Image (cartoon, rainbow, N blue to C red):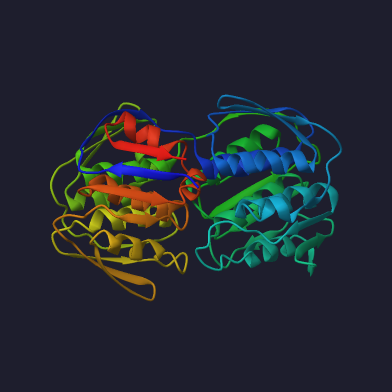
Amino acid sequence: MDEFVIDGGRRLRGTYQVNGSKNSALPILIATLLTDEDCVLDNVPRLRDIRTTFRLLETLGKKVEVSGKRVKVSYGKALVTHAPYDIVKQMRASILVAGPLLARFGKVRVSLPGGCAIGMRPIDIHLKGLEAMGAVSSTKEGDVVLTGALEPSRVKLRFPSVGATENLMMAAAAVEGETVIENAAREPEMADLGEFLTSLGATVKGAGTSRITVRGAARLKGARHRVISDRIETGTLLCAVAAAGGDVTLKGAVGSHLTALIAALRRAGAKVAETRGGLRVRAAGRPKPVNIVTEPHPGFPTDVQAPWMAYMTLAKGTAKVREVIFERRFLHAAELARMGARIAVSGDGAAVSGVPELSGAAIMASDIRAGAGLVVAALAAQGRTIIQRVYHIDRGYERLELVLRGLGARIRRLR
């Protein structure tokens, strides 16, 4: 398995063009199942999970052609409605095929999804939403089976689940009439998906707010779309510069996508400013302790919690971190402790008592964002850190070692 070797203690400097959003590209790629016509997507990141999505689409009958960061999805053969376990087990987002396939064909069978081991992450919100539109759900041999002709409906989610919101938006786009999704997720990725669905021929209003209206169409067309920039990659790099020190400009970064994180960084002492077409972050010295609680957007993003915790290990005081989105999302705390961090975890909370410096150590990534947090810590640490299981990191970051090396970090990949 690949490893990262990082010699820490170097400031980061330079300019970097942020990649397209993984969390936006995945549902938009899956939304191409709604049409038999050609779809061309630009700014698609080259990630392990994206490649898994290509294989999933091809298994279902689509033809996928990749040229750099441009992806063309077209008709390959008649679509099938069974997403098999050997692909679904690799990526939780595979459950998103349920909405579009059910809406088009009245049936779908999806193996229970895999992905990062960061808690139960139930799919019941997806199922109840589709049931509210007329679906009948059951389980068979480890698969979720959905049948029924969907109808426009008013659906209120018990929690603003990102995946469930996306599934319902896609399903509603292929159902004639108006569907209203209340208590919807408000992440920027919802707005991006809404824009793509509108370009296919549906009418989507309110995407990115808690109330989304989708007027579907019986037949959707092809479209061309550019994926928004990745706010989680942006957030990770903001934390990395804040922890290691330096001066970096992130081109393509959108400040309004990360208001809670940017506010926390500023309170901690980092200087974050919007520039023409991006963000600039400058930092030096140990941060002030700042408490955060993860929340649905526009609150503090759960996917940046681990990089933030790594930053707070160096604070002049104790910072509290509360994780209320996913359980078991403090697996990185034990690895940070191997580097000298002082972290006390209790339930959904962690108290991070800052230390003057971290020391390099052999550590292991447990999931995508935990791995990113370990990279942040390693960049700020004194000495050499070896991070194992970086395949987790590769699922969400495109050649992170090259990005950081371009900003002055001493990091290499061992195969």
Q: How many numbered marks are there?
A: 0
In screen coordinates, is 51 left or right of 243? right
Tell me if residue 237 comes above or below residue 321 in the rendering. above
Q: Position of residue 359 (x, y in %)?
A: 22, 54
Residue at 63% x, 52% y is 90
Q: Position of residue 178 (x, y in %)?
A: 71, 50
Quarter where residue 224 is shown = top right
Residue at 77% x, 29% y is 37
For the view shown, which residue lies furthest in the right direction?
78
Quarter where residue 163 is shown = bottom right
Q: Nearer the viewer, residue 310 or 40?
A: 310
Residue at 74% x, 64% y is 131
In screen coordinates, is 343 left or right of 329? left
Q: Nearer the viewer, residue 78 or 141?
A: 141
Q: Position of residue 44 (x, y in %)?
A: 55, 32
Q: Nearer the viewer, residue 226 or 65?
A: 65
Residue at 61% x, 55% y is 92
Residue 211 visible to an observer of this rendering = yes
Quarter where residue 4 is shown = top left
Q: Position of residue 201 (x, y in %)?
A: 71, 34
For the view shown, which residue lies furthest in the front direction?
415
In screen coordinates, is 102 left or right of 264? right
Residue 203 visible to an observer of this rendering = no
For the view shown, which residue lies furthest in the top direction?
67
